Image (cartoon, rainbow, N blue to C red):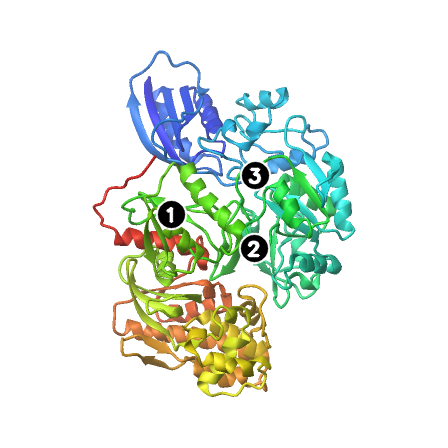
Amino acid sequence: MLAHRLLLTGRVQGVGFRPFVYRLAQRHGLHGTVRNALGQVEILIQGPDRAIHAFANELIKDAPPLARARLTTHEELAVDDAFGDFRILASEAAGTAEIHVPPDQFLCDDCRAELDDPADRRYRYPFINCTQCGPRYTLIERMPYDRSNTTMAEFVMCAACRAEYVEPANRRYHAEPIACPVCGPQLTLRNAAGEPLELGEAALRATIQSLRAGAIVAVKGIGGYHLMADARNAAAVERLRLRKHRPAKPLAVMYPRRGPDGLERLRQDAQPEPLECAALCAPARPIVLVRLRPDHTLAPSIAPGLNEVGAFLPYSPLHHLLLEDFAGPLVATSGNLSGEPVLTDEAAAHERLGAIADVFLDHNRRITRPADDPVLRSARGAVRAIRLGRGLAPLELELSRPVAEPVLAVGAHLKNCVAIAWDRRLVLSPHIGTLSAPRSLAVFQRVIADLQALHQVRATVVACDAHPGYESTRWARGSGLRAVTVWHHHAHASALLAEQPREGQVLVFTWDGVGLGEDGTLWGGEAFYGVPGAWRRVASWRPFRLPGGDRAAKEPWRTAASLCWQAGCAWAGAPAAAKMLRDVWARAHFSPQSSAVGRLFDAAAALILGKHEASYEAEAPMQLEAASDPHALGEALPLERTADGVLRADWAALLPTLLDVRRPAAERAGVFHDSLARTLVAIAARIASTRPLSCVGLTGGVFQNRLLTEKAASGLSALGFEVLSPARIPANDAGIAVGQIVEFAHRAPRSARAAGRD
């Protein structure tokens, strides 16, 4: 007889790990206990030597599919005659925290079968769950993960649920969100004024009737509200756009499960590639951008000017019921005002969405924190994150170099995410949004406090962007913590290396909209050589002016006119307002210098497509990519070296092609993409001729463009370079917080002790 103590960390809470351990110990005839500690699971096990070793081997190999367990301690103890049968003990709330917060999980097959079974007591119950599925992150208030520490503590289990909860052989043994129609959350359909109309099953039936009649319904889900409408009803979609003041930004569409893999109905409208199919069916059930079929059945205004749609499958039991009953695709866009975090509270939702939604399908399970849907897009043989959210965030990474002290990173102004890091652990928050709205700032501050409280880590320093006008930077400087500034594009480069660390010097292209550069101008077309903490700018683009500053991003014609004036080219298609802008362009104070490739894309869309205004970020570049002939060929643009040794690409050589209206728009758009890709490859070749270089990175929002990225990567690979592109961390500004932490880690003294844990 032997006795052992095993300590496991990683994702071991909220995934059915303790019940699994119980059943495994029973199978091997072992005695002992298992309990949750602060983010860890402690097992005391006693029995025959052979049985204990078999148990330890199967503990990791056969762990629940959602678990990510790591055995950190395995030590022998003295045999204790007091050990009885194997038991699950109450959680331990003291000791050193090693917390890994579980993400929200999709509806598992077992629960879906019960949901659809008229003989089951949870038939059509919209909040069915078990140890392998259901909400986690959005209902946990503190760790350890016990029902008393979640919003489900507000619901007292009935006798039937309690019997399942304490029965080791049951699938719901210690399933903390366990509920049923007798004791759990309930649905209420309300009108825009908040007055109740129907309850329970009747609320579901009335919701379906409303959707079929062309109504817009605000539906409270796992991480917040969706605004839903019939995706095939052109009038309903246009009404949603008009009320939400969202004239063109693409709308996500949720499809009912059909066929062996659940994607049969989706394939009537789209042509997903195999890796996109795998992503659509993955546990996070993300929104995946898939190519539309020419004969799709969706309303024309679902994704204006684009050839893709953001599609996803139902991931909660409520969504499953809605989509099955409606039997068709539904628009399921974030329930928020533009740029703000998704709404979670009923009162706030009715107040802010009351002018948009006709009715509200509410429920009384409180959402602790918002979690919008994640968005992915495929490129270079992988699906890559565009927005982090439910099921994928909080995202945890292991740092190649530990931070010297616990650090908070507050990210950028757009697509804001925040992060904390201590020792070698880094945790990145879900998508927050643009920090220009008061509600966004409130959620931003709440997530900062929340991340630290959940992981029981207190930051002693804050890393922020160098731009003094960012709200995140202002908050950092007023936080009372020591503030460390990080250049925007250094953070982009270092975020890539956080996800895909490499030894030695790397060349990283950071192409995006605009970010403050070290010379005080607005960068966005840079290439850096070096390592995190020691980047050297080695390439950029010929600078140009942005008349009106930030307005250039919303009015692409401004950058197009600026390029033409600077190069001495006539633009016959310029809007009438261009004449009045010429004086503004000539005055440096109102026309800051920029090297941003994102703005070059804006200009190209204005010159080729006549896209003079944009109602959402990157609208013009996205439509330019969609309009491009992928087979059109361009040429590498001229490069010249400046006095400080920086290679500069000259965009002016492209203007004659962009302005040549005799050539098809698709061809000119394709030439633009191909020329930029060839220019990038030429820059890499020039850098490699004078420095050791084997690895090239592509990051920044511009590289969410699949056509450009794949062309550039193909050219680089042909020259023998290893090419890195972000996958788990978005290439856009959502990854800036990660880069800020990596920069801090590489600047700080390596011998400093980590400190600051509560």
Could you tell me which quadrant the N terminus lies in?
Answer: top left
Q: Which residue is mark 2?
A: 288
For the residue pair 25 and 290, the one nearer the viewer reads as: 290
Q: Is residue 517 visible?
A: yes
Q: Label 1 sits on what residue type?
A: Ser
Report the disc number at residue 367. 3
Q: What residue sits 67% from the left and 33% below the top?
A: 186
In the image, residue 334 sits, relative to residue 543, either above or below, namely above
Q: Label 2 sits on what residue type?
A: Val
Horizontal relation, residue 681 to residue 661: left or right: left
Q: Which residue is mark 1?
A: 479
Q: Is residue 410 visible?
A: no
Which image quarter: residue 572?
bottom right
Dot 3 or dot 2: first in sequence order is 2
Whole-percent x, y for residue 450 in the image: 45, 40
How packed mark 2 is, by other alpha carbons closer than 10 Å (few <14, some 14-19, many 20 or more), is many
Horizontal relation, residue 560 to residue 406: left or right: right
Dot 1 or dot 2: first in sequence order is 2
Q: What residue sits 65% from the left and 49% below the top?
A: 353
Of circles 1 and 3, the one toward us is: 1
Which image quarter: residue 695?
bottom left
Report the disc number at residue 720. none
Question: Do the residues under discs 1 and 3 have CB atoms within 8 angstroms?
Answer: no
In the image, residue 711 sits, relative to residue 269, either above or below, namely below
Q: What residue sits 38% from the left and 52% below the top?
A: 738
